[in-house]
Amino acid sequence: MTKAIRIHQTGGPEVLTWEDIEVGDPGPGQVRLQQAACGLNYIDVYGRSGLYPVGDLPAVMGMEAVGVVDAVGDGVTDLSVGDRVAYPMTLGAYAEARLIDAVKLVKIPDSINDETAAAMMLKGLTAHYLLFRTYPVKAGDSILVYAAAGGVGLILCQWANLLGANVIGCVGSEEKARLAKENGCHHTILYRDEDIASRVREITAGKGVAAAYDSIGKATFEASLDSLRPFGVMATYGNASGPVEPFNPMILAAKGSLYLTRPTLATHVSTRELLLEGAERLIDVVASGQVRISVNQTLPLAECAEAHRQLEARETTGSTVLKI
């Protein structure tokens, strides 16, 4: 027997329960992991609350972790017992041990510790697809980053700065503004006190941004569109304030022939090639120190409900790691 965080029904943080589960031997193409730490992500909230489906209940929650291979199934040739690996976007991460398909795993070098590895895969690969695939950022581009002091936000700001972008970050407090600026954000907007689109126009001398990376959803949708330059790209990739309501596509024409996309990390790691392309680039910038992963909260996995409460209350900065 091993322990895991499961839900038997969807709802608030209180539905997360710490309980015994059975983990058997790996089948063909699988390995068994003894896990060291799990990442906490907003997609975990979406699954727990019922916004995103998680399959049959009860279900083990969590989407990313780091661990060590302790058993290998038939047909697995590129992993061995003792290999240290991490993964994103695979439900069942909130567990002391688990089975997982080998093709979903990425080897982690010793230069990256467990806390960093647990926090970097889902958020870092999200930043990767936004910056390199959704809108390929070029030197001199102005971009708008929401939740700039959050886990994805801090990575986005650093990596975009590395690419030569002018980074504008939306934050909820002066403390978060300071943190964003320490991580590559050139300008900050206090979204509770300032009009986002007006400040963006002021910062960019009226031009607007090339891309808006919006993880907030409903509450900021129009502000994001109004912040874009002609032909700008709006990536709505999260729903922290709720899903965007239906709208008339003609609004994109009126605001400057804009592009709108709703990308997901699941699509961007759906093949081994896509996963490795992003992971190799991410590991390179983290191992070299060019992008730092800010783990600003750690809790035991058994206290997962409190971690969810803190995340939803916007009490966190950077990444939260659940230790096993």
Image (cartoon, rainbow, N blue to C red):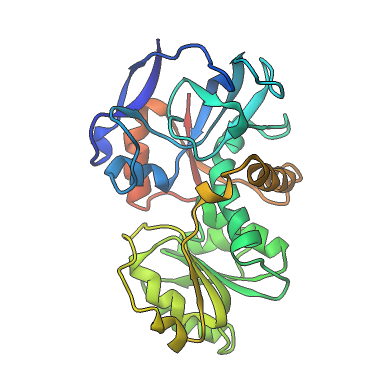
Residue at 31% x, 40% y is 48
Residue at 39 percent across and 18 percent down: it is 3
User: Residue 69 or 144: which is nearer the viewer?
Assistant: 69
Relative vertical location of residue 160 with respect to residue 321 in this rendering, above or below = below
Image position of 280 with respect to 236: above or below: above
Depicted 180 relative to depicted 34: above or below: below
Q: Position of residue 120 (x, y in %)?
A: 59, 42
Left or right, residue 130 beside residue 240: right
Tell me residue 26's x, y (percent).
53, 15
93 above or below 264? above
- Position of residue 254 in the picture relative to residue 246 (left or right): right
Closer to the camera in the image, 46 or 189: 46
The quadrant in which residue 165 appears is bottom right
Q: Nearer the viewer, residue 240 or 183?
A: 240
Return the x and y of residue 300 as percentages of the image width and height: 42, 28
Tell me residue 207's x, y (percent).
58, 87
